[in-house]
Structure formats: C-alpha cells, structure tokens
Image (spheres, rainbow, N blue to C red):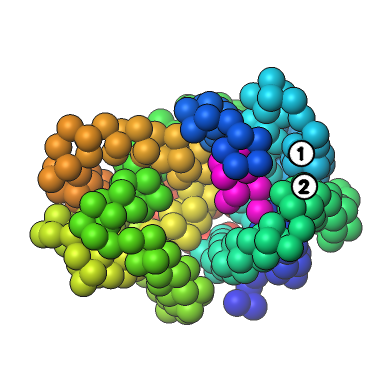
Amino acid sequence: MRDVPRTVWLLAAGQFFNMVVAFTFVYFFVYLTDERGLPVAQAGLISGIGGVGMVAGNFTGGWFGDRSGHRRVLLVGSLIGGAGVLALPFLSAALLYVVPPLSQYAGGCVRAATGALVAVTVPEGARRQGFAVTRFAGNAGFTVGPPLGALLIAHTSYTWLFVVDGIGTLVFAAYAARILPAHGAARYGPDRAKAEDGPRPGVFAALRERPTVLVLLVAILLTDLVYRQQYSTLPVDLDRHGLGTGVYGWLLAINGGVILLLELPATLALRDRAPLRIIGSGLLLVGAGCAVLALGTGLGTAVAMMLLLTAGEILYKTPATAYVADHAPAHVQGRFQSLYSGVSVSGVVLSAPLGGALYSAAPGLLWPVCAAVAGAAGCLVLVAGRGRVRQPSTAVAAGGPADGPDLETGSPARRTSG
C-alpha cells in the first residue's frame, strides 16, 4: 500500500464521508410515495429518469475531465449535486422530473472524475491498490449511511434528511478543493495531452487498438445486468418462496460485510497475478452464484448465492477498473474511465426491466439465464487473456510499457513507472 499516494488516501477519506451522508439515493422512492403522496407509477418514472441521468453522467464525466481537468469536474459536479439535493424538499411536482436527474447526472460525473483522478495519480503497477482503497471507503460509508438516514427520518423529517445530504456534499466539494492539487486541471487535462509526442488517436480509435479492453467492457456490461438482479428480482423471488424482507436485508449485510473484510486483503494478495484471469474468474463466480439459486430458492441456496456473488465482485471490480486505466493513453484516460464507469452501472437502468420481464414470463428461467450470461462474460475475458497482444505505440505516452504487456500475465516487458 506504500505505492498509493497520499492524495488518494485523502480523497478516499472524503469519499467515505460523502457516502455516509448520501441518503437521498436510498430513500428517494419512499419519499416520493410517502411524503409526497405520488402514485407508485409516477414515482417509478421519476426514479427511472434519475437513474438514466446517473448512468449518462458516468459515461460523459471523463470526456469533460480530459478537456477541462478531472479535479474541476469533481468540484463542479459536487456543487451541482449538493445544491440539487438541498432544493429537493422545496420542488414542485413538475421540477421533480428535472432537478433530481440533473443532480444524479452530476453525481455520475463525480464518480467518473474520481476514477480518472485515481488512474492518473497512482503509478502503473499500484492502481489495483489505489482503486481498492477508494472502493473500500465508499462501501464503508454506504454501510454506515442508510441506518443513520433511517434514524434521521424517524427523529426529524425527510426535509432534514436532504438538508444533511446536500450540505454534506457541499462540504465534500470544499474538502476536495483543498486536498486535490490546484494544478490538477492542467496536469490531468489538456496540458498533459499537448505534452505528448506523436499522433493522438480519439477514444474509439484507441479502443480499436486495444481489443482486450473492448472485450472487457462488453463482459462488464453483461455481468452488471446479472449482478444488479440482487436489487430487483432477487427480493421478489425470495418473497415468492416464503423468505421475507428480513432475510433479504441479511443477505445484503453479508455482501457488504464480506467486501469490507476481504476486498483490500484480496487485492493485495493478488496484485501480481494476471488481471484478466482474476477478472474472468470473478465473473464466473457471479454466474456460479446464479446457478446455485437456479437449483431452488431457499435459505441455504440464497446465502450460497450471495457469498459467490460477493466473491466474484471482490475479484472482478477493482482489477477491471485498474486494467482499463493501465491500458488507456494519457490524453483519453478520463474517457476510458467514463466508459468503464458507464458500463459498470448500466444495470441500474437495464437490469430491473429486463430481469422483471423475464421473471414475469418464466420465473424458472431467470437464474439459469443469468448464470449463462455471466458465465459467457467470464469465458470471454479468460479467452481474451490467453494471447499476447502488442500494445499500441500511444501507450508510451500514457506511461505504459514500450514493448507491450503480456495480457496473460499482466506484466510488461519493460515498465516505465510503478
């Protein structure tokens, strides 16, 4: 962990605080139906538009960062997001279709900017540790936050919930402005790109030169559709088989607890292992979890499913983020991170309607199909990692190896840093 710069540790500490006060995402739907008295269909539409905004922010935040600086995107996004949450209790019903999606869009941009900042701050060879630190901080904060939000609702009101969330986000923006280097916009943005020699291909041309990154993005997209079934069809299936909300809550607690206990140690233990092999194995474990549940939905199979799903998440999420960062040219680092961030949350919008439609038509097919999709994604990544592919010449400017990495081992023939 010595290779993780101090700035990343400080950013992770701020992210922990920001996630502790991030109540709105958890209680927004309940607020709309309870406090505002909106019909479930209308509340679902508003929430769905907000989810689209969040995914769009993940896809585009890196584009802004590559041009204007990732530090600036993080700060502006936090200010817009915090102001939007603060205003939420005072909005008319019509503005609920506009302001929350804008706030969530800003939050998505912040997530992409955070990933890009870690990617350009941490040297190659230590990025898995860097991303693991920020993921740990975010997960720890989100573990603490929802119970505190419930207490706040019980003892005050939804208005205070959003006030605390909004002010907390603004405090995070002020903290980030202080701890992130003031020259970050120039260092991480266009000035650094101008300093590179030779032609600078666009993001899609750079992706075509890196087919394993493309394969990985497709695999993550498919897996996220499966992974996020735990937030939509899983509780419905549990209830159908006589396992109530309490069981579902404990399953989520198992997921969060195991991640907090094991993700950092696992990342350190596997930091020198082949990244695509680790990622592919993690995706296969996600598929195995669904396959277990396909045998029958009961308490034992549900716990086994969650343990396998969590183990898969620990193996694939951090190494996949680092792999995309390690293979991105410097001038499109933010855009590569945006692509990864976008596909890694695509299930927020797509998983519930697709999984719900399949479950409504044929409940017995849901988990076998999920197992097949995640298993196919894992096999794609494992096959992609079996060959040696020469790294494009633009990787030299990105701080990558001049001779090209061995995509099976993840070890470059000659490292320039890290």
Dominant SS type (magenta): helix
Q: Point out which mark residue 159 bears.
A: 2
Instruction: Report which quarter residue 150 is drawn in.
Output: bottom right
Tag 1 near tag 2, CB within 8 Å: yes
Q: Residues within 10 Å of mark 1 (few under 14, many from 20)?
A: some
Residue drawn where x is 28% and y is 70% of the image = 303
Which element is circle 2 on?
Answer: helix
- Residue 125 or residue 269, whichever sits in front: 269
State the image coordinates of residue 243 (x, y, percent, origin top left): 28, 62
Quarter holding the C terminus?
bottom right
Residue 413's tag is none
Choose top left, top right, bottom left or bottom right for residue 70.
top right
| Vertical order, 116 against 246 (above or below) | above
Label 1 amino acid? Pro
Secondary-structure class at tag 1:
helix
Task: Return the residue at label 1.
Answer: 89
Asked if residue 31 lies in the magenta stretch, the reply is yes
- Per the model, the C-alpha gap separating discs 1 and 2 is 6 Å
Quarter placement of the N terminus: bottom right
Q: Amino acid at mark 2?
A: Thr
Q: Residue at x 70, y 36 (%)?
A: 103
Label 2: few (<14), some (14–19) or many (≥20) C-alpha neighbours in 10 Å: some
Q: Which residues are magenta?
A: 23-32
Q: Is residue 281 visible?
A: no
Query: Residue 293, position in %: x, y?
Result: 19, 59
| Residue 353 image position (x, y, % from top left) | 35, 32
